[in-house]
Image (tube, rainbow, N blue to C red):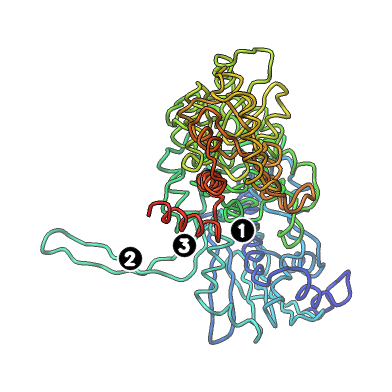
Amino acid sequence: MSSGKINVSVENIFPLIKKFLYSDHEIFLRELISNATDATSKLKHLCNIGEAKVEYGNPMIEVKIDKEGQKLHIIDQGLGMTAEEVEKYINQVAFSGAEEFLDKYKDAAKDAGIIGHFGLGFYSAFMVAAKVEIITKSYKDEPAAHWTCDGSPEFTLVAGDKSDRGTEIILHIADDSTEFLEEHRIKELLTKYNKFMPIPIKFGTRTETEKIGEGDDAKEEHKEVDNIINNPSPAWTKQPSELKDEDYKSFYHELYPMQFEEPLFHIHLNVDYPFNLTGILYFPKLSNDLQLQKDKIQLYQNQVYVTDNVEGIVPEFLIMLKGVIDSPDIPLNVSRSYLQADGNVKKISNYITKKVSEKLKQLFNENRAEFEAKWNDIKIVLEYGMLSEPKFYEKATEFFLYPTVDSSFLTFEELKEKIKENQTDKDEKLVVLYAQNIEAQHTYIEQAKAKGYEVLLLDSPIVSHLIQKLESENEKLTFVRVDSDHIDKLIKKENNLISALSEDDITKLKTVLEEVVPKETYTVQLETMDANAMPFMITQPEFMRRMKEMSATGGGMFGMGKMPEMYNLVVNTNNVLANNILSESDKEKQTHLIKHALDLAKLSQNLLRGEELTAFVKRSFETMN
């Protein structure tokens, strides 16, 4: 028997572990099973290179609850430890056996699947245990060892009576952590952290029924079998050539059991230079609420679950996707909860952006019709990418689509060609007309279409920011919403119509209108349009409207605060109403005509609310009577 003090580099290490080392106590199970996996992977590697003269077999990791004895057991069939190795790897806190192993076998161990970087991982057991035992026997022909510690720097190390290879860790669960003696709690943790560990994990047994014989003589036989709770070979660990579409869909539902809709498409990531990265990303159907979509991608390190907060690794615009990223090259702190600064992270992010771009371009080229059919479900991600990732913006111009109000789709080059066809002055900026709401802006859309303009439908919540980006990247391009003041100037220039009113009448009409229309909100503009066009229309200054929208979607960006309400009242001098207002001699009736026409224009733009709407309805009924 030997006894002594654990060689700690920090005084009172155990209280430090219990309180500060890990952000969540439940992480202990992940750490211990990761160590068991590590030991098993090491053994497999040593067997493969002929250094371990033992039969590897079909090892598994077993987790057992002894509720009556208040104990939790984690048992592996890995390489085990000698008493000397227990002294070295357990008593010398923060010395990583995995690091030493990798250093010794660094050339041969590249593909061995060894987790490494655990350091203090074993000591996470003391967050939930009042006492911890290790009973272990090495694959080498040496006696077993039995180590015990009660959470103080004191330990005992004696010969063990274990006869089979591997390690058993026994946690004597503390009174304040008895939740970890509940079967449902342990199953929850195993499912969360160890669902795709590369070594089978047994947790209890299950009953299987098998039919023996045929026909009336057939009998059912019930037998107990090991309950393996993980999938050691998930889809992302395989080559894309090994998988079919059905396999990818099946894995999607394995990742997200409560997700009933099928993913739109997937992207399989597989690279081993200049870093190691595997994974599968899925494009699900998305809503316009960007915040609700986050934290769906799961991060793994050699099949060990780390987190679903992948900011910094996955480009921000792709955080709304679902799936798995697995890389041993992603640096993690001891709790594996937060990333450390590292050059590899940016490389990985750039690589993922590149792969997604290539996949989208491939889908567009192979089947444009199918790509267009999925556009509304993926556009919010791509718009966000165009705004936030310069590298993605460069590549996306080839497959990014601009839908029209007539449900057709144009690429950027097709859009420019279409505009050039209809634009008389080729030296001027290309003017792109767009709507954000077909129903609300129907009148303006029809007016623009009647003049031969192509009208896009850009209805995402970040469209103002996207337009700003597109204009900054294309100097000879300007976007104008169909109900903005710019459209009045365009149509006036195009139509070359002659006003039915004389210049004197136009001056008088403007004076009459400005006496009634509120000056603080509306600027009166008299325009010569088709006689059948709307008599009164409300437009908004393009710049003010755009700044207002960007302020609303950008969290008060530019420090502008609440933007003022400013509109243009466009009056068609060729509509009969203009002449009726001008020729009305009764001032009260004239005022009534103007107010009623203004209210109708406001109603069409959803600007008539509250008391004004009530007064308008009442006045309308009175007019009918």
Are the residues at dot 2 and dot 1 in contact (C-beta closer than 8 Å)?
no
Q: Which residue corresponds to the image point at 72% horizontal and 33% vertical from the top-left? A: 390
Q: Which residue is mark 1?
A: 37
Q: Which residue corresponds to the image point at 60% horizontal and 13% vertical from the top-left? A: 424
Pick whichever, 413 or 266, lies toward us: 413
Across and down, in percent, residue 216 comes to 10, 63
| Res 48 → quadrant | top right
* Cα distance between the residues tagged 3 and 1: 15 Å
- Which class describes the residues within 10 Å of circle 3: few (<14), some (14-19), or many (20+)? some
Across and down, in percent, residue 68 comes to 53, 87
Q: Earlier in the sequence, mark 3 or mark 1?
A: 1
Pick whichever, 308 or 539, lies toward us: 539
* Cα distance between the residues tagged 2 and 1: 27 Å
Pick whichever, 536 or 364, lies toward us: 536
Whether residue 237 is visible here, answered yes or no, is no
In the figure, 70 relative to 11: above or below?
A: below
Locate the N terminus by quadrant. bottom right
- Which class describes the residues within 10 Å of circle 1: few (<14), some (14-19), or many (20+)? many
Across and down, in percent, residue 520 comes to 71, 48
In the figure, 134 relative to 81: above or below?
A: below
- Residue 208 is tagged as 2
Locate the C terminus by quadrant. bottom left
Helix, strand or loop for disc 3 = strand
- Residue 52 is tagged as none
Q: Which residue is mark 3?
A: 228
The kind of residue tagged 1 is: Thr
In the figure, 553 relative to 497: above or below?
A: below
In the figure, 13 relative to 287: above or below?
A: below
- Horizontal side of 517 relative to 622 (left or right) equals right
Helix, strand or loop for disc 2 = strand
